[in-house]
Amino acid sequence: MSLYEIRNMAIEIAGDRLIEEVGLTVEAGQCTAIIGASGSGKSLTCLTPFGLTPGAVSGSMLLDGVDLGSDGSVQIRDVRRRLAGFIFQQPLTALTPHLAVGVQLQEATMQAGAARPSRLELARKLERVGLSRADERLDQFPHRLSGGERQRVMIAAAIAHSPKLLVADEPTSALDASLRSEIMALLDELRAEQGLGLLLVSHDIASIEGHADQLVVMEKGRVVESGAASTVIAGPAEDYTRRLIAAAPRLQDPAPMLSRPGEPLLETRNLGVSFDRSGWRRGKIKALADASIMLHECESLAIVGGSGSGKSTLGRAIAGIGPVTEGEILWEGVTLPERRKRDLAMRRLIQPVFQDPVASLDPHWQVRDIVSEPLHNLRPDLTPAECARMVRKVLSDVDLAEDFLTRVPASLSGGQAQRVAIARAIIASPRLLVLDEATSALDPLVGAEILKLLLRLQGENGLSLLFITHDIAAARRLCHRVAVMEAGQIVETGEMQAVINHPRHPATQKLIAAS
Amino acid sequence: MLALITRRLMTAIPTLLVIILASFFLMRLAPGGPFDGERPLDPETQAALQQAYGLDRPLWEQAWLYVLRLVQGDFGPSLVYRDFTVSELIAQGLPISLTLGGLAIVLALLVGVTAGLFAAVRAGKAADQTIMMGATVATALPTFVTGPALALFFGLWLGLLPVSGTGEGVAWLIMPVVALALPVSGAIAKLTRAGLASVLKQDHIRTARARGLSETKILFKHGLRPALVPVASYLGPAAAGLLTGAVVVETVFGLPGLGRYFVQGALNRDYPLVLGVVTLYAALIILFNLFADLIYGWLDPRMREG
């Protein structure tokens, strides 16, 4: 008998049937992964049977002989308490901010009725998930830890009461590539060690390949294909599965067709950014040191690095939305003054696009107003009619229909919102786009389409792109050259394919190994 | 934390000095003087009095002398209550005002947070709507309406509580404290409810729920503290307001608190008395805001940074 078995499950929220005829099994000590694009219902499928979404569930769900069904005989809260553990996507917000790590871990350990653990036992649990200085961390508050450390704490807490089933809802989507593979390896170990069944949700086939035993592919609330993971990935039966697999960027993919770069456009010379330390502590934090890059017309340069490597600081400095403390930025050989002293023509040249498309759009504005706003500031010479015409033109450039004009950001999907953000960035005819993790928050199908759109825009308008990302495989689809960053420094630059084939710096080798 | 306290106390000194000097000069801009009675004094007596209290000296010199004495803990003599120093008057009034204000804050917190919690748990239901309507009414009613209304009902009609004065026991405190606490508790209830409504939607609440904790435990252990951050920001100014705002309640219930001295001192141009009370209020407000900041750090450790 399987550890966890779902048969013919359906889920409704407020009368809408969102999930239908879903079935899957998880064996003890093994991993079943659910993959699908965003909105395919994978999180609902794994969380709703445990009462963690507002959805109403029907069908048969058996966990370790306990029927989770809706006949009311089982207290679903008790099932969560005793049998299951949960990890969520956002390690930044999933821990209670005002309780020290040790307090939360103790609560998790005692949730199924275990005795109060000693401090040493708690520290051991943190060490088990790969945290150093475990004793010290017990007294720390979550905001003091990095994203990867927090996710390790989440894992320690999720398995602290020795559950039978671990439900992990996109546990690595918010982490950079090398952390992602470390966390996946940790989950593998824990599974083997404790005979834990793992139900894993991911939108990213690459990150579960080699880790999942069973694979369930979902689309629009239904299972389209399932089976042994290796079989499904090697020979997908459904077209949707094939597209999902093809969308995930890999380093082994054939080389993409890229446009031919022109004259030098932008150069930074020994750019440095440092911040004052917070509070009464003296001294400065160097976020970026000695960064020199060169970007040509119609060229794409990838800035690749892990979290905290300073890649966003560099991008913000170039886009003129972050501070510069040292060095200079040259545009066609002429020094660009600091943001406030740039005139309208200069400001128009460089436009940013950010990671979280929905959060970067004003929620109260219509798409029409969001997209036309740069024109009001940067092109005061245009009449309202000309503005309206340009908004229509640019929306069609990013493949959005005219009925999007009056939509508000909350009604857009992630991919649509990112298209709006790109439309806003290109409407004033810039020469350079600074894309800060512009595809990282999107699922692979949507991310691949955005990459295609960027390639097309580059071909049509001769745009230069600065593509900031932690994912070198995604950057490879778009970029001619790459600069690898670590700890505020550029450690390696070169032609994309040459760097991938022969990485010299350890940081680059690590990035490539993790992809 | 110690660094925060020292830094705040250091900046408190210049702040206080500015407040004292500003009120000193502003008060002198107002026409009239402490010795203007219904029957004008003859010029010689007037001059003698002026000289005795040093009011004939240049204004900046008077200000300087006042600050010098203040540093030594001397608030000077009252110009109207001739037999008392300002320190003696404050020593009489302050305990009553602090008792009233302190009890009112505690009552407002108890009632407000409880009501807010209750409303948040039953969000959108009848109980929630009733509580929030009650909170709006409580906030909207001024103390000069609730005070006399309470006195009329419980004092005159039911004869349960004394209407005026301090009297024996604690019964005399009940009505003034309730009148003072009512509007503040309404505001606290609304802030608590709004805070909880936003916190209960956050991810860490789902994590707590995933552990199978009871809803009560989730609410008190994981939800309440961050939800009270807006209450803490409101509490500093509110506490100061309860002390200064007690003027009306002290008058309605005939209590000899600080507020009465403040108003009478201002009307009589009793310069040292007004300055003394202003200095005290300013110091208390600075102190309460420091408390509020310390409470922030406890409610949400992220605020301890920078």
Image: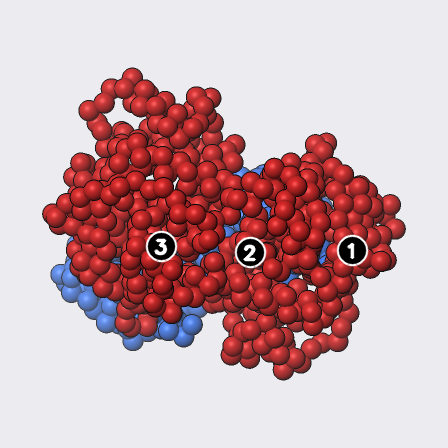
* Quarter containing the N terminus of chain A: bottom right
Which dot, 1 or 2, sits closer to the camera?
2
Q: Are marks 1 and 3 in contact (CB under 8 Å)?
A: no
Secondary structure type for disc 2: helix
Residue occupying image coordinates x 23% and y 33%: A378
Q: Position of residue A332 (x, y in %)?
A: 14, 45
Left or right: where A386 falls relative to A124: left
Q: Quadrant of residue A292?
A: bottom left
Cα–Cα span, label 1 and label 3? 45 Å
Mark before the other along the chain sequence, 1 or 2: 1
Q: Can residue B142 be spotted in the picture?
A: no
Residue sitting farthest toward the top = A385
Nearest to N terminus: mark 1 or mark 3: 1
Q: Say which residue appears at 80% left-offset and 45% top-offset.
A: A7
Q: Colour of chain A?
A: red
Kindly identify which residue carries mark 3: A497
What is the number of callouts on the image? 3
Q: Which chain is blue?
A: B
* Mark 3–mark 2 distance (CA, rounded to whole Å): 22 Å
Instruction: State the mark number for residue A207.
Output: 2
Between residues A390 and A304, which one lies in front from this camera angle? A304
- Residues under numbered marks 3 and 2 in contact, where contact means CB atoms less than 8 Å apart: no
Using the image, determine if residue A410 lies above or below residue A73.
above
Mark 1 vs 2: CB contact within 8 A: no
Measure the C-alpha gap from mark 1 to mark 2: 23 Å
Mark closer to the chain start, 3 or 2 = 2
Q: Which residue is mark 1?
A: A4
Please say if B41 is above or below A95. above
The amino acid on which the numbered mark 3 sits, given as a three-letter code, is Gln
